Image: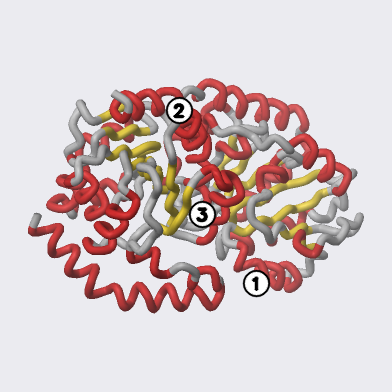
Amino acid sequence: MLARLLYSFVFYCVTPLVLLRLGWRSFREPVYRDTLSQRFGFVARSTERPIWVHAVSAGETIAAVPLVRRLIKDGHAVIVTTMTPTGRERVVSLLGNDVEHCYAPYDLPDAVNRFLSSIRPKALIILDTELWPNIIHYTHARGIPGFLVNGRLSEKSARGYDLIAPISRPMLNKLTRVCVQSESQGYRFRQLGVSEKQLDVTGSIKFDSTLPDDLELRRSELTRKFVDKKVSLAASTHEGEETEILDAFKAIAVEPTNLLVLAPRHPHRSDRVYELCVAKGMRVVRHSENRPCLPETQVYLLDTMGELVYFYSIAHIAIVGGSLVDVGGHNPMEPASQGVPMIMGRYRRNIDDIADQFIQAGAMEVVSDQKELLAVWQGMLVDKPKLTHMADAALVVMNANRGALDRVEKVILAIIDG
């Protein structure tokens, strides 16, 4: 308790800095200024007791959508909270008026309690590892069951939680159930004090993601747009990755049928990425300008939100971002669900268990530097049988891992409805 009180005191002290950072980010993304009061727990009172689903940003929100739809079908109201505008946009786009949405409160005692008093949730579901000591403490104190879904911890994160054991162990012990992605993840949680009674190895619900209803229509439109082009999609890239990818692509772009679709993780960086493409001598078209892709176009900049899934549908190869620089790697299940052969870099700590399955099955190639990226990329583009094998292998891994959503739903409903 003393450790959590000290943590809260420190959080109050640094809150002005948090607000300054929020203001700084709002210069690039003005939406960060919207509904600032929600971050301090000032939200409209719920008319019914919803299940509170917390997903940090866009990736977690997309993963949560099938579970949220299941909960709604089971007769439960749902409120989804996020921390970022991209997550908010995904909630609005994918779930619309089926759920309530607001930003999650900062992990300050008064903000959390104010939020809980207004929302009166019947349960809390947290995606991945967005663990906040006060949120978990005060939901537990009110008798609200708390669930961690898609639980994962890299070795680095596990060491970090162990260093703050006086805070992390009581926090984890207050969760009703911890649903982890794999046995190795379960081991890391057990080492941090999670009991066998709390722990369920359910797998990742990201394997159970569903494709949009209009996928075939959009695929046809994009196929016509990129007729006679062999598309490589570099998805969810970060600063530094675009340089490596574009430098490698220079040799590949010599063949005019090769096209790079470049999709930065954060759309507000698109102007800088566009300028980088121009500086590298690439002929580039921006998706937001709705211009045609000409025969001489080399790079197509996907600078909008929510359309990546459609571009995967026409991609021959996917380079999964966050792995060529030290971010930790983004979700390979998105391209794999559509049978797209993948390339990742060496930084995969966020998804190492999952990436290993695709690597072992032959659905993913791993590169350690720009030279290897070029060699692997070129080799895949000219080896059609290999691409076919990799595509088939990706779908095999996806199908073998489906079912996590059913297991998670069963765990949650047994407690909420039981």
228 relative to 398, above or below = below
Q: Which image quadrant: the N terminus?
A: bottom left
208 relative to 175, above or below = above
At 52% from the left edge and 28% from the top edge, which residue is drawn?
Answer: 360
Question: At label 2, which amino acid type do we have?
Answer: Asp
Q: Which residue lies furthest to the left in this view?
A: 2
Q: Position of residue 176 (x, y in %)?
A: 24, 35
Query: Does residue 174 show up?
Result: yes
Where residue 272 is drawn, which disc sits there?
Answer: 1
Most foreground residue, 189 or 156: 189
Where residue 74 is drawn, which disc sits there?
Answer: 2
Most foreground residue, 297 or 256: 297
Do the CB atoms of the residues marked 2 and 1 lie less than 8 Å apart?
no
Question: At label 1, which amino acid type do we have?
Answer: Arg
Question: At label 3, which amino acid type do we have?
Answer: Gly
Most foreground residue, 335 or 131: 131
Indicate which disc, 3 or 2, sits on the residue closer to the N terminus.
2
